[in-house]
Image (spheres, rainbow, N blue to C red):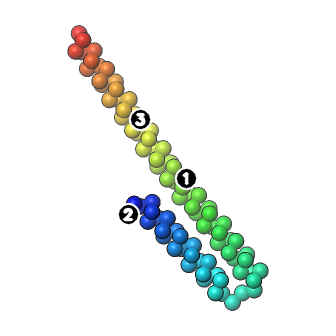
Amino acid sequence: MGSGKLLLGVLAGVAAGAVLGILFAPDKGSETRKKISKKGEDFTSGLKEKFDDFLDDISGKFEDAKEEVSDLAEEAEAKASEVRS
């Protein structure tokens, strides 16, 4: 199981637990709706932060791979020049 799927499962479990905890709390309906809305906003912002971190990580890895390919291409070109000489 990938770490992304595991993280998504954990986040979904946390969200479900929070919603169930709020629904079974002895508050008025309007208070419960406010709490659900707040938890939804918290969950969304946390998920957005995780996604941004994921994109930053992928972008960094892409840039590293791009640099490595560029270096390899330069080395291949230099060796090809040596062979032609």
- Image location of residue 9, percent across then percent down: 48, 68
- Image location of residue 84, percent across then percent down: 24, 11
The answer for how far apart the CA atoms under marks 1 and 3 are is 21 Å
Rendered position, 51 above or below 7: above
Badge 2: residue crowd in 10 Å (few <14, some 14–19, many ≥20): few
Residue on which the image places disc 1: 52
Residue on which the image places disc 3: 66
Q: SS for tag 3?
A: helix
The quarter of the picture where the N terminus appears is bottom left
Q: SS for tag 2?
A: loop
Amino acid under label 2?
Met
Quadrant of res 75? top left
**Would you say 82 lies left or right of 51 here?**
left
1 or 3: tag closer to the N-terminus: 1
Rendered position, 34 above or below 78: below
- Residue at 38% across, 29% down: 70
Residue on which the image places disc 2: 1
2 or 3: tag closer to the N-terminus: 2
